[in-house]
């Protein structure tokens, strides 16, 4: 059973210390699942003590909150189409570069904020500066995931928003598993820590330790892992 769930241990050295990063494989999580049950069924059995840290993909958490929306249910307004045409595409994913994802950014962040961010972005490009749009638009816009060719089905036809109340979710899951918990948004270009169970979970430390995106972002079906310091 352990070998079926723990599919890898991606050891990493950080500041003269070594950390095991156990990667856990789950079933395809949907809005029919309960996130507490997933952590209890897949991760809790492997927790050694309260110093272990469970880290979860924000996409998995969002899916259980019904924040994964089929593309065919999103009706972009003309403004969304116009703005999406000016978004720079990256290797990390479509981002807001399609009308459906931009429409959700308008709904999540508000039209005025997105328009202001777009104006600031134009100024940034004139100064050869990148990232100003997402800095102004905020984490809700930055965390929107659109469909990609490598996205695990059925989510290759969905837009996924960031989870609601990630700190609160992490705290609840900490009580389920009796260890620390973090909710992360990672891809091959970077990482954000969206939620932590308590102040003892240092976001800067997690960014360094998980910056190589050990969960992967393709169809591995490995949305969760456990960090354990090597004795």
Image (cartoon, helix red, strand yellow):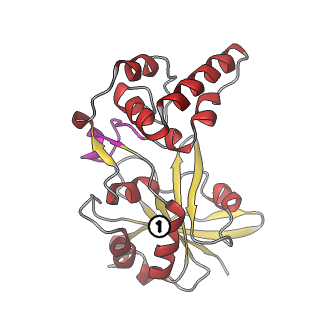
Quadrant location, the C terminus = bottom right
Residue 5: image location, x then y, percent: 36, 71
Tell whether position 70 is magenta. Answer: no
Q: Is residue 137 visible?
A: yes
Horizontal side, residue 169 vs residue 138: left or right: left
Residue 83: image location, x then y, percent: 46, 20
Between 55 and 115, the one lying in front of the other is 115
Horizontal side, residue 13 vs residue 227: left or right: right
The magenta segment: 145-159
Residue 121 position (above or below residue 29): above
Q: Residue furthest right?
A: 16
Q: Quadrant of residue 189?
A: top right
Between 184 and 100, the one lying in front of the other is 100
For label 1, the residue is: 169
The residue lying at 49 percent from left, 43 percent from top is 143
The residue lying at 34 percent from left, 30 percent from top is 100
């Amino acid at each position: 059973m352990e070998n079926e769930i723990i599919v890898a241990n991606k050891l990493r050295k950080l500041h003269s210390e070594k950390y095991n990063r156990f990667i856990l494989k789950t079933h395809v999580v949907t809005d029919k699942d309960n996130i507490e049950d997933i952590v209890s069924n897949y991760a809790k059995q492997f927790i050694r003590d309260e110093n272990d840290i469970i880290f979860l993909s924000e996409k998995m958490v969002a899916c259980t909150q019904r924040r994964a929306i089929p593309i065919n249910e999103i009706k972009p307004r003309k403004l969304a189409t116009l703005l999406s045409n000016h978004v720079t595409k990256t290797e990390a994913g479509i981002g807001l570069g399609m009308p459906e994802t931009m429409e959700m950014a308008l709904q999540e962040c508000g039209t005025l904020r997105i328009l202001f961010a777009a104006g600031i972005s134009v100024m940034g490009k004139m100064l050869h500066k990148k990232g100003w749009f997402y800095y102004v638009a905020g984490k809700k816009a930055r965390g929107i995931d659109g469909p990609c060719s490598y996205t695990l089905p059925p989510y290759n036809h969905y837009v996924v928003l960031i989870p609601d109340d990630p700190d609160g979710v992490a705290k609840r899951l900490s009580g389920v598993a009796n260890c620390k918990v973090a909710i992360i948004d990672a891809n091959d270009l970077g990482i954000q820590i969206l939620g932590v169970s308590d102040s003892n979970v240092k976001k800067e430390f997690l960014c360094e330790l998980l910056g190589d995106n050990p969960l992967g972002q393709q169809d591995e079906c490995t949305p969760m892992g456990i960090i354990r310091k090597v004795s």
